[in-house]
Image (tube, grey):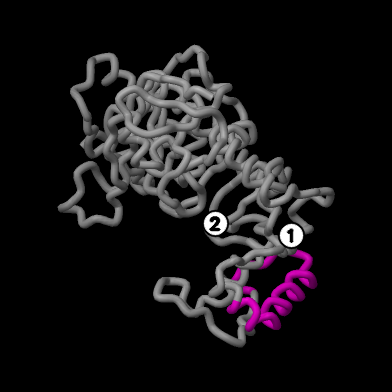
Amino acid sequence: MEPHRLDRTEARRIAVRAQVLDAERPSDVVELVRRLTLLQIDPTAAIAPNADLVAWSRIGSAYRPSELVNALERRRQLFELDALIRPMDDLGLFRAGMDAWPSESKAGEWLARNDSFRRDILSRLRSSPEPLLSREIPDTSVVPWQSSGWTHNKNVGRMLEFLTLRGEIAIAARRGRERLWTLAERVYPEQLSPPTTEVAAVVRAERRLASLGIAREKSTVMPLEPVDVGLAGEPAVIDGIPGAWRVDPAALGRPFVGRTALLSPFDRLIYDRVRAKALFDFDYVLEMYKPKAKRRWGYFALPILHGDRLVGKLDALADRKEGALVVNAIHEDAPFTSAVRDAVGAEISELAAWLGLDVRYQ
């Protein structure tokens, strides 16, 4: 078919609307995760844990982190897999192909040589009436896990991760940052008929495109979740941006009313930095791993969305000991109008109130 021809403004608005960042706010975190398809878990809490910060930026100050915990651990409307929270409705799309995992030889060889270790863990989880922390599970590995990174010789942790990816166990809950593990059948629904891996891949791409609105057919391989969508949706071209795109046809021709939002550095609107630059002309790097002297925008700078434009970065940190949201700087990509400045200030006040902190400008 002939590709849809979009200008940059329409493309940006499709992306913002798809990420539930327009003026029409959702009221429920489960509804939100269904629309976004995922919330990423990250231990950094310079402002708030990522999943909560992303939910707050959509729902607003009515959101309570306890709602997410309840949906995950009690109502089982959501599940956690590979550092991503997803709707339980999508579980079959990820169970498909789990029995055949891993295709990667290193993990497969290690699992085969440690089959007795695998069976020990399954037996221990089966005999425990309550989910267990990893430190409550003995290391009976035959061959240690070899890695040049932090997972070297972390045998229990590696085996738990692998058994989760194989669909044999699941994360039942969290105790602080620590995960509690149990058998998959104690967490996942009993009646589940996963599609074939081929069908699952197609549906996952369609769901991903619906959450992004517009994306590349092929892009750089990214950890955790791809940013490209294959042949999902319909072809599109964007005026002034070279290359082919795919667009969700349901997102075309819809009215747009924007608002101001403070985004997590891991927010999916800006997670694909190449797309953010192409659509929004927005440069961003998470600088928490840089030496302080080399940072342009701050340790955990929050991208600032206003309408359909990304207009700057907020350098702020939550100092809970002092009871303050400390604003070190507001970096304006272009000089703010008084209306933008007021809207950003109001959003900063909303964030502080949600955190139970006062705003302190440095």
Mark 2 residue crowding within 10 angstroms, few (<14) / some (14–19) / many (20+) = few
Within the magenta stretch, is there residue 312?
no
Residue at x 54% of width, y 83% of height:
144
Q: In the displayed image of the protein, which residue is found farthest to the bottom? A: 142
Q: Report, in whole angstroms, how far the alpha carbon at label 2 lies from the one at label 1.
A: 21 Å
Would you place residue 355 above or below residue 251 in this image? below
Crowdedness near tag 1: few (<14), some (14–19) or many (≥20) residues, C-alpha within 10 Å: some
Q: Is residue 27 above or below residue 194?
A: above
- The range drawn in magenta is 109-136
Pick whichever, 39 or 233, lies toward us: 233
| Amino acid at circle 1 | Ala
- Considering every residue shown, the one lying at the far right of the view is 191
- From the top left corner, tell me how far across and down residue 288 is, in percent: 30, 52
Query: Who's the residue at 51% across and 48% down the image?
Result: 225
Residue 135 part of the magenta-drawn span: yes
Per the image, the residue denoted by label 1 is 184
- Name the main secondary structure of what is drawn in magenta: helix
- x then y, percent, for residue 155: 56, 77
The label number, if any, that marks residue 176 in the structure image: 2
Q: Give the side of residue 295 with respect to residue 202, left or right.
A: left
Callout 2, which amino acid? Gly
Residue found 15% across the figure and 53% down from its top: 293
